Amino acid sequence: MNHSPSFLSRRSSMVRQSLLLNSDNLGRRVATGAGYKFLGIALRTAITIGSTAVLARLLSPAEFGYIAMATVITEFAGLFGAFGFTNVLIQRRVINRLQLDTVFWATLAIGFLSALVVFVLSFFAEWLFSDPQVGPLLQVLSLTFVLNSLVAVPWVVLSRLMHFGAEFWLQLSIVVVRTAAAVASAYAGFGVWSLVVGALVGGLAGVVVNFARVPFLPRFRFHLPLLTTTWRTSGSYFGSSVLYYINMNLDLLLIGRQLGATSLGFYQNARSLTDEIRARIAMPIQHVLFPAFSAVQGERERFQQLVLRTGRLLAAIVIPVGVGVSANASELVQVLYGEKWLAMIPVMSMFGLSAALRASTAISSPLFNASNRVGLALRYNVVGTILSVVGVVLAIPYGVNVVAMTVAATSVYALVGFRAGFALIGLGARDMAQVLGLPAFSALVMWLATFALRQVSVAWSSHPGVLLMLHVAAGGVVYLVALHCLSRQYFQDVRHAVKTFRSRS
């Protein structure tokens, strides 16, 4: 295949520019990245919620439960793909082309290994979950590991360049294609397989659009010392990924095995919706902040100001969203899922509170990573995982509602890691309270106002959609007024971010 000179030049220029982290105009670039992230959040969340409302009416809770069972296995194999090679490259101020080639072939090999692991484990799935439906799903889903491993280097290049506008369009196109494939398959009567089709088509679309935007052509060479000299850091990333896997999947495994696919469908769908707060808001912001924090890791005062400003913005957004989901769980379930899903209301209410806490403290992860203290983060994660495991094991005999309450209670430990991350750059408990305290108090006022309004609004209308719009609008106003009365700093941060984003050119 012949490439035009412009194509070759663009490939060489983009990859070459990514080899050195640039801290020039960092505030503008962070604001631009955050702006694109929030725009992407809004669009992808709308697509996800809309597709969920459609799929929940086309598929049964048990069919969602089967996919949740399969996820326990696929995420276990996915741990090997998260060995930390890409994070090592993002954190380093200077890298070279040989290291990019090495990471490409290493992650591709791991992708093939992960696919093989999933395929083999599929034959034991019936024993693990006491259900024969999961094995065939896993055998097909194993292909996604190979597809996902191919985009590791394009992701590193875009992250180091902080080209978040490009990433916005890439991610949006993938979500649209994946969602369309899943919904079309469900309408065609494919049942649970429609979710598998969506995953495969989305993975293939990711490969196509990433390499179209970052025309990286790997060379047939490999530098083993890169892997051997970074094994300790990569191993810490891997260890944190293992702990994250246990936290996110132990409850699914126990519920699926002991309570069945239907109960797991209720539990997992409630958790998936609230996880959107982290997946669509907190984790993308982590992606923006990791290279930004890495670029200023040697400038203490500048680092502190960037952390405080971004921490306030993140908390001011995610805390009311999570608390709002908890306050409006009843109407949300009826509007999005329908009458057959009412059993998930108390679960969603608990997960909303948990998501607010975990998402608002998510800034601690890029703090540990950018400071190259991944091992310290691992030790904090070990303690958090032990608390989570003990809580879930003790709660499982009492049903999914008690498990959700336990998960919400153990998520309070996230504050400990958040405090430790602040301490790494010389910030203290007062700074931590400044970031989280006022949004949390304002969100509590919003929750109480929503509860009080519900006592009278049900007499005005019995339609859950009308009640949901009324409660969300009133709650939003109450939150903004309360936060503004407590401090104007948050609104100044928003104005500064908007102004910086608008002046990015």
Image: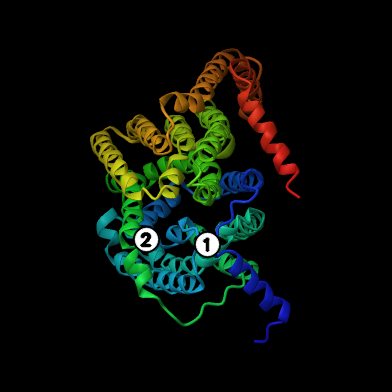
Q: Quadrant of the N terminus?
A: bottom right
Location of residue 101 in the rendering, given as x and y in whole percent from the top left corner: 48, 74
State whether residue 255 appears in this view. no
Secondary structure category for the residue under label 1: helix
Q: Which mark is residue 83?
A: 2
Instruction: Establish if 106 lies above or below 496.
Output: below
Residue 182's quadrant in the figure? Answer: bottom right
Task: Kindly tell me whether residue 392 is visible in this rendering.
Answer: yes
The type of residue carrying mark 1 is Val
- Between 241 and 374, the residue placed more toward the observer is 374
> Are the residues at dot 2 and dot 1 in contact (C-beta closer than 8 Å)?
no
Name which residue lies at 42% across and 45% down. 265
Measure the C-alpha gap from mark 2 to mark 1. Answer: 14 Å
Q: Earlier in the sequence, mark 2 or mark 1?
A: 2
Q: Nearer the viewer, residue 79 or 453?
A: 79
Q: In the drawing, what numbered circle is on residue 32?
A: none
Amino acid at dot 2: Phe
Q: How is the image coloured?
A: rainbow
Left/right of residue 140 with respect to residue 387 in the rendered view: right
Residue that carries the numbered disc 1 in the rendered image: 156
Label 2's element?
loop
Q: Position of residue 482 (x, y in %)?
A: 60, 17
On the rendered structure, is 467 left or right of 389? Answer: right
Q: Is residue 282 above or below residue 352?
A: below
Q: Residue at x 27, y 63 (%)?
A: 124
Number of marks present in the image shown: 2
> Which residue is nearer to you in this view: 31 or 143?
31
Q: Residues within 10 Å of mark 2 (few under 14, many from 20)?
A: many
